[in-house]
Amino acid sequence: MLADRRKPTTATPKETSRMARSLGQRSFQKRPGPRGQPPTATRWRGWLLALVGLVAITLCLANLGQRDLWQDEGETAVLAQSVLRNGVPKALNGPNLILQRVVGFNPDYLWTFHPWGQFYLAAASLKLLGEHAWSVRLPFALCGVLCVGLVSWFAWRHWRSLGAATLSGLLLATSATFVLHCRQCRYYGLSALTCLLVVATFIELMVGRRRRWALAWGLAIAAQFYADFATLGALVPGLAASAWILKARRRQIVAAATGTALAILLCLPGLILHWDRFGAQAEEKPVYKTNLLAHLCYLDGWFIPLVFLIPAAVFFLVPALRTTGSWATPQRVAVSCTAILLLGMLTLAFVVPTPQLRYVIPFMSLAKLILGLTLMGAYHRLKSAVRSSPLAASSVAVGTAALILTSVASVPIQYLLPKSAIYLYCHTPDFCTRQRPFIRFELIGLIYELTHDFVGPDRIALNAVSDLAEPGDVVLTSYGELPLMFYRPDLCIRSPGGGAATMPRPQERPALILLTARDAPAMASYLRDLSARTPYVEIPVSVPVATYGNIPEPSVHWFSTPATSARGAILLRADLIGRRPTLLETAEESTRLWWPKRPAAVNPRR
């Protein structure tokens, strides 16, 4: 039967006081000041939260177009250009085919490998702001800023704690991992925002009476579906577990079912379009042991240090599970968030074939929320123990600064497990990491990156193509063909890295061939056959060793240009030597010419 409408759905004052004491607090909400004056928390809340927002805006938006797009970003940007031309993302982009080692489109060249939300979001930004690296990244960076604001709002709404709201937002805004992903022209920032909206609307649906949350819940689910399939699949076990932990009543279950039905109706076109993609995903066999160990590394290294899980359980899980008589309490909300976070990450371990940190980025907002609440719980417990607010506040401030600036609280799993266990789980010696130091300073590295120039292989390729290629030329590159398609859509871009379908046809004679240190075997075979038919002139170049320097995951990310370089070459067809009358004979000469940043690097000949 439906619950009695007159029965209260929140804890009684006595129960609330008992639960508050279990957290070390006297009350979840500050007492208001005298009539006509704002409470102390309200007076300072605006300034502190504005400071957190300023940090998020600065880190997410500063120098957004400094680095050139890398391979995966180029895919999103080129498909966004296709949306502007065709109304839908098509893999056949004029003379170029978008193909990254897998076929991500149907026979009509409609893109099916990813949901379309990111492409339409990027296309809208390109339409409004022009075709630039910063404009195509801007909407995803703004999603990251909104995530910080939503986390702070969520903490304030359910705990009425200025400290929890500030700490949660600050921990998320200063996470170099989170910022790096949101600064990418990729679905990461959008998926993080929609994931947080799904959780926020779910909690409101569980603790509220208003039916409008059912509509918001359905819209959030649909938005998550069109942002990222995998994250939505990973949220389902956590949401189901949370509904059980929160002891959802019939009214909440009916509302959730109504919102789910709306979401299914909105997602039906996408389900039909991407059905083959789901089937292909099911055929891929994940290595479950490797995924579980990888996500354990991610949880400890970039989400919540494992040493904080025990105090988190003490402050939230134990008091919540011991509470009786009410289910709509802040502690039970924390239980729900914890269940969604952990079960969601574990679910992804059984879904994705290859463990990647980028796949679990949407859960980072919840992790920082739990970490912020844990720090506030530690503050109140410490204040009660030492009876000194300044000492408790300074201790928590030092701990927070250590968490923000370093990874001192995280213990790399490879230091705990013997090498035999790593080999047993991963079958590879360099599991999940590029052998980073025991303590990392990623935020400092991020600040350095935002204030200094970074030179990568794409920079050299773009500048060389700008000087040597004419509209309609065929350009062959061993890496970075997708960014070239975005910056120079007037060229025919070919690459063996994308598959045999993107190699030049026999009648095509590339005007320019860009070779990096990461040459595919197919490229070498093609060059042997080509050299017998067409003479080329070699221009030597120095190429940074960090081919993947722009990839957002900190384990492989380079915050600064590598000091060492590898030998590369640019081959110009002999009959086009007039485009470079003075041939560059040394790598030092080409470095001086093609390493500097050029303001007109985007579509220079359009």
Image: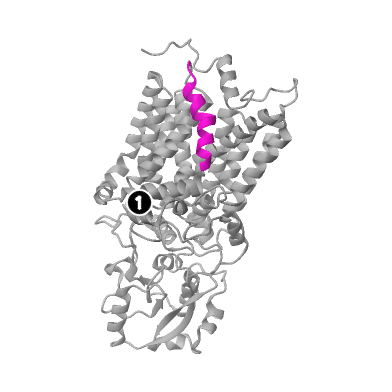
**x then y, percent, for residue 326:** 48, 18
Q: Tag 1's secondary structure? A: helix
**x then y, percent, for residue 352:** 34, 49
Chosen colour scheme: one colour
Residue placed most toward the observer, 46 or 518:
518
In the rendered view of the protein, which quadrant contains the N terminus?
top left
Residue span colored magenta? 307-325
Q: Residue at x 59, y 41 (%)?
A: 169
Magenta-span inclusion, residue 320: yes
Name the side, left or right, on which 85 lies relative to 15: left
Label 1 crowd (10 A; few <14 / some 14-19 / many >=20): many
Q: Amino acid at mark 1?
A: Thr
Residue wearing tag 1? 290
**x then y, percent, for residue 371:** 55, 39
Q: Residue at x 37, y 71 (%)?
A: 493
**x then y, percent, for residue 97:** 32, 64
Residue placed most toward the observer, 192 or 275:
192
Residue placed most toward the observer, 406 or 362:
406
In this picture, is 593 found above or below 206?
A: below
Q: Residue at x 52, y 74 (%)?
A: 564
Magenta-span inclusion, residue 360: no
Q: Is residue 289 visible?
A: yes
In this picture, is 141 found above or below 72?
A: above
In this picture, is 192 found above or below 2?
A: below
Q: Is residue 605 visible?
A: no
Q: How many marks?
A: 1
Name the side, left or right, on which 106 lies relative to 364: left
**Predominant SS of the magenta segment:** helix
Residue placed most toward the observer, 484 or 517:
517
